[in-house]
Amino acid sequence: MFFNSNVMNTKSLSDAQLVCNYISGDENALSILINRHQSRLYGFIFSKIQDRDAADDVFQDTFIKVIRTLKRGNYNEQGKFLPWVMRISHNLIIDYFRKNSRMPKFKSKNEFDIFSIISDDSLNIENKMVDAQIENHIRILLDELPDEQRAVIKMRIYQDMSFKEISESTGVSINTALGRMRYGLINLRKMIDKHKINLIN
């Protein structure tokens, strides 16, 4: 699963410099990048999947995609190599859950909850950067929801309001508020599927 590099004099180079070297034809540069970040990236993947074999597959698939993107000259994340790679792995994790019908569920109902994927108190700085960008994409998708559904989700997720408080704030019954939350999450899932969770720039 892991790559080794015997090139010692380039290990002090920045990620951006190593990426440029790899694009220029230095195959060892990618080995150094992978060795540099493999523990952090693999730990992130395993923390989400909790399956060693599946985590190995996602880790390998992540760098296969990294290599293809770099080879095609489509990389435009100068200075942001690790957050970019982690976005790739995050999308592959989503694909894994979708293919295995194991998408995380909304805690209080049997409904999909994308926010359970992006919440993790143990995240390091790089992970938080990635999750912040993912949340920005989700906020954009929320704006496409009907007003009533969007309002309930934002009050529940971002303002941490109880359904009783939401009911009082919106002037509807608790059951109606729950229903709007439910259908809002269903519609959000449909939009995420439609957009194929494409969070990579």
Image (spheres, rainbow, N blue to C red):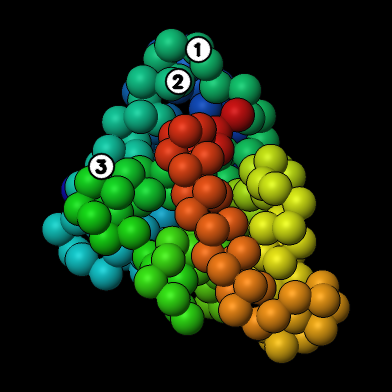
Dot 3 or dot 1: first in sequence order is 3
Q: Residue furthest left?
A: 53
The residue beneath circle 2 is 70
Q: State the image quarter where residue 161 is shown.
A: bottom right
Q: Is mark 2 on a helix, strand or loop?
A: helix
Identify whether 88 is placed above or below 201. below
Identify whether 6 is placed above or below 39. above
In the image, what residue occupies the spot 48% across and 54% down? 186
Q: Is mark 3 on a helix, strand or loop?
A: helix
Q: Residue 60 carries which label?
A: 3
Position in image of residue 5 (x %, y %)? 31, 40
In the image, what residue occupies the spot 43% across and 62% down? 112
The residue beneath circle 1 is 73
User: Along the horizontal axis of the image, is 115 left or right of 168?
Assistant: left
Label 1: few (<14), some (14–19) or many (≥20) C-alpha neighbours in 10 Å: few
In the image, what residue occupies the spot 40% across and 14% down? 71
The residue type indicated by label 2 comes to Leu
Position in image of residue 2 (x %, y %)? 24, 48
Label 3: few (<14), some (14–19) or many (≥20) C-alpha neighbours in 10 Å: some
Between 96 and 76, the one lying in front of the other is 96
In the image, what residue occupies the spot 20% across and 66% down? 51
Identify whether 139 is placed above or below 105. above
Position in image of residue 10 (x %, y %)? 49, 36
- In three-dimensional space, the C-alpha distance between marks 3 and 2, rounded to whole angstroms, equals 15 Å
